[in-house]
Image (cartoon, grey):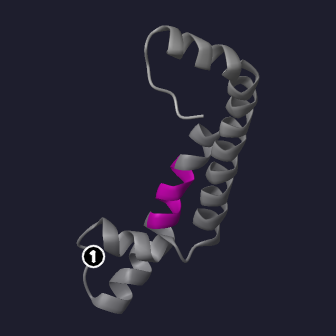
Amino acid sequence: MSTKMLPELKVVYEETVKPQFERENQRPPKDRYEIRRGMQQQQYYKWLSSFKRTIQEMMWESVATTVERQLPELIKQAKDRGLHIME
């Protein structure tokens, strides 16, 4: 899904952020920091950033369930191998 959405960021940059920056500064952006400041003001960028964060949180939440279920066995295996475990 994000592979279809990420290319739209370039469109937002080319059609909105870059022209606005050039109007205000009489030059193109010199680095990614100047570009990022402009992009952070765009609704699409905000929405996509929120979407990516939510997806990342969901991924870690799904992994945590598996790890928590297996934790006693993982601790046992680590101790059997002589690893120090903080419980």
Q: Quadrant of the C terminus?
A: top right
Main SS class of the magenta portion in the image: helix
**Residue at the image point whose x is 72% and y is 41% from the top:** 58
- Residue 7 vertical position relative to residue 71 in the rendered view, above or below: below
Q: Position of residue 41 (x, y in %)?
A: 55, 77
Q: Position of residue 54 (x, y in %)?
A: 70, 50
**Residue at the image point whose x is 51% and y is 28% from the top:** 85
User: Neighbour class for label 1 at 10 Å: few (<14), some, many (≥20)?
Assistant: some
Range drawn in magenta: 7-13
* Residue 54 as seen in the image, left or right of residue 12: right
Q: In this view of the protein, which residue sits in the foreground, 1 or 69? A: 69
Residue at image mark 1: 28
Asked if the stretch drawn in magenta spans residue 8, the answer is yes
- Mark 1 lies on a secondary structure that is loop
Location of residue 21 by image quarter: bottom left
Asked if the stretch drawn in magenta spans residue 17, the answer is no
Q: In this view of the protein, which residue sits in the foreground, 35 or 19? A: 35
Q: Position of residue 25 (x, y in %)?
A: 30, 89
Q: Position of residue 35 (x, y in %)?
A: 37, 70
- Residue 3 vertical position relative to residue 29 in the rendered view, above or below: above
Q: Quadrant of the N terminus?
A: top right
Q: Specify the amino acid type for callout 1.
A: Pro
Q: In this view of the protein, which residue sits in the foreground, 58 or 18? A: 58
